Image: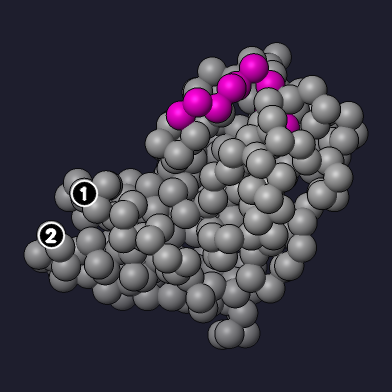
């Protein structure tokens, strides 16, 4: 069986997704090609998502992944959403099936399981989440499933943090406009903004805000070693890079695309061994 899948996004030329999916397909004896459709290099914009989805369908794609900045923008062009995608309000995987476009979110599952594997002893009494976009929404959903008691959410656009809290409709989710004050009373910090990604160097918070008893998880996976994680480790913080979330969400997307369950442990070992 042959599968054609892809990634529609901006600035994705260095993505590790093709290697992650194609490597596992070979291990399973499947023929799969993962195509990058980079808006930045093709002179397109997120406004052309509908056109690109139509083209992918006509070419016989089984589905596509949707990274930033399109995880919410893609929703109006879909026929239906999975229960998780609907609850999160963001889509990172679109499956084409019987003439319909079905939006899924596998990010939340990737983050939930990454925390369980990579930071099994992390205290979840209170956590600060930086970033309330598509990735932040999925992480918020995942952390609630993990049993967090209080989740403070900060975004540079305060309305986005307030909107996410309203969408969750859960008293445990608390929007904040003062991340420094919130950070003084939490067990962990989750970073879900583009800062630290290749092309977006730096840290979303000052180094002085970190302390050794704080665990720090970064959703950024390219590179795996961000300035935030490097600094946090130097200060003695337990840390978690974004590679586990990236690989584990890809494993679930692989299953949705092909109907074949991948070997998640094999994918995780290969996909996080070195920076993709």
Q: Dot 2: what SS? A: loop
Q: Say if mark 1 contacts mark 2, CB within 8 Å.
A: yes
Question: Can you tell which quarter of the image residue 187 is in?
Answer: top right
* Residue position for label 1: 263
Question: Can you tell which quarter of the image residue 9 is in?
Answer: bottom right
Residue 140 % position (x, y): 61, 32
Marker disc for residue 150: none
Horizontal side of residue 220 vs 173, given as left or right: left
Q: Is residue 171 above or below residue 144?
A: above
Residue 82 % position (x, y): 41, 37
Task: Look at the image and say whether residue 181 sits in the magenta stretch.
Answer: no
Task: Look at the image and say whether residue 122 sits in the magenta stretch.
Answer: yes
The main secondary structure of the magenta stretch is loop
Quadrant assignment for the N terminus: bottom left
Residue 220 % position (x, y): 59, 56
Residues rendered magenta in the picture: 120-128
Quadrant assignment for the C terminus: bottom left
Residue at 36% x, 70% y is: 18
Residue at 69% x, 60% y is: 227
């Amino acid at each position: 069986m042959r599968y054609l899948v892809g990634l529609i996004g901006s600035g994705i030329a260095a993505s590790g997704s093709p290697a992650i999916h194609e490597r596992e397909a070979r291990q399973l004896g499947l023929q799969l090609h993962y195509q990058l459709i980079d808006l930045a290099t093709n002179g397109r914009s997120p406004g052309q998502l509908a056109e690109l989805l139509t083209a992918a369908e006509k070419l016989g794609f089984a589905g596509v992944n949707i990274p930033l900045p399109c995880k919410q923008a893609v929703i109006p062009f879909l026929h239906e959403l999975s229960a998780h995608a609907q609850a999160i309000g963001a889509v990172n995987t679109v499956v084409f099936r019987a003439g319909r476009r079905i939006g899924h979110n596998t990010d939340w599952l990737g983050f939930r399981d990454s925390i369980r594997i990579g930071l099994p002893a992390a205290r979840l009494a209170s956590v600060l989440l930086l970033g309330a976009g598509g990735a932040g929404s999925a992480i918020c959903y995942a952390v609630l499933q993990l049993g967090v008691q209080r989740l403070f959410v900060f975004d540079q656009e305060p309305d986005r943090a307030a909107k996410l809290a309203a969408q969750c409709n859960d008293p445990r989710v608390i929007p904040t406009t003062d991340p420094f004050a919130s950070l003084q009373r939490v067990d962990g910090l989750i970073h879900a903004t583009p800062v630290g990604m290749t092309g977006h160097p730096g840290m979303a918070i000052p180094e002085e805000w970190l302390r050794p008893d704080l665990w720090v998880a970064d959703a950024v996976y390219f590179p795996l070693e961000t300035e935030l994680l490097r600094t946090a480790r130097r200060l003695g913080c337990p840390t978690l890079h974004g590679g586990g979330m990236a690989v584990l969400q890809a494993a679930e997307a692989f299953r949705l695309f092909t109907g074949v369950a991948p070997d998640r442990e094999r994918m995780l070992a290969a996909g996080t061994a070195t920076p993709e």
